[in-house]
Image (spheres, rainbow, N blue to C red):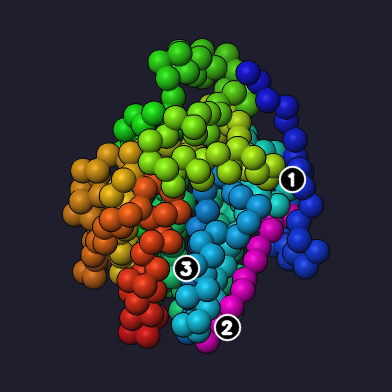
Amino acid sequence: MKAPRRTTPPIAPPPDATFLRGRGDLRLYAAIDGPGTRGVVWFVLGPEVRSAPPYPRLTAALHDAGLATAVLHARGTGFSDGLRGDIDDFARLLDDRRLFLEHLADRFGRIVLLGHSVGAALALELAAVSSDRLAGVVLVNPAWRLTYAEGMGPTLRDYVAYAINAVIRRSALTVDMNRAPSCVAFAPDRDEGEAMQRDPLVVRYFSLRYLMGERRVMARCPGNAATSRAPLLLVQGAHDALVDPSSFDALLDAAAAPDKSKLVAAEGGHGSSAVETMVAPIVAWIVAHVDG
């Protein structure tokens, strides 16, 4: 299947939405909420941005602790403008996030990045060049080494199609990143995947060149971890079927940060359950590092 191409979000942003201007004068949706007296936690999102704000339980606890929370929808995702699912230069997506980091640094003295899955790889990319600006980095199920998980990964037929597309139509929107969530074994991940399929804001189809750019960032995770000196917390969902479980300790071993630790979310899968079932220890770690 080849999906249609569109350059604006399919639903309108909130009436009080605020935007930054990215390269090419593109509108980028940005939201900052909460008191921020202690600093800000930036939820670094991947490409599958949902219409509802992420991590409601964690967000409420961070606000109660005096922290602001921030999100940016990079070009072509969420409520931001830009071609959805394809980009000719993946560096522009990284530029968007560097722009937002500058925006946060102008407003807050203490910044913590929280990246989840592909968002964790993007957070490490930022940390590698900006660790001196960061009070800490939280990585949840970082997408570095992946395994095959039923309903969460490509089939053999998909790989054949991808190989053909990589040669003759690298920009076509052909890859469904959430193809069969009903097949996912872990119930919270299955429910989340099905909700994402119903969410009109979530980008469903991506081009091979987009995913190849994303994979290059994912492959840089160990090198970026070895470059950043920012305090690091790695959160592993015990029921994560998508990420190779041995990769968590390997990434932690590669990290150069003198202050690094790991938490295991016993009731967490690959998705937001790995965050929302670990609110208290995550908030405690963040508060300790913004106050330190």
Q: Report the disc number at residue 35.
A: 2
Q: Amino acid at mark 2?
A: Pro
**Helix, strand or loop under label 3:** helix
Q: At x 46% / y 79%, what residue is drawn?
A: 110
Judge the density around disc 1: few (<14), some (14-19), many (≥20) Cα neighbours within 10 Å.
Answer: many
Residue at mark 1: 9
Q: At x 53% / y 78%, what residue is drawn?
A: 63
**Helix, strand or loop under label 2:** loop
Indicate left or right for 12 with 45 as reference: right
Q: Amino acid at mark 1?
A: Pro
Residue 252: name its quadrant.
bottom left
- In this view, the mark in front (3 or 2): 3
Q: At x 23% / y 65%, what residue is drawn?
A: 261
Identify which residue, 47 or 64, lies in the foreground.
64
Q: Earlier in the sequence, mark 1 or mark 3?
A: 1
Residue 235's place in the image compared with 117, above or below, is below
What secondary structure characterizes most of the magenta part?
Answer: strand
Identify which residue, 47 or 108, lies in the foreground.
47
Indicate left or right for 201 with 249 as reference: right
Identify the image quadrant of the N terminus.
top right
Judge the density around disc 2: few (<14), some (14-19), many (≥20) Cα neighbours within 10 Å.
Answer: some
Indicate left or right for 251 with 26 as reference: left
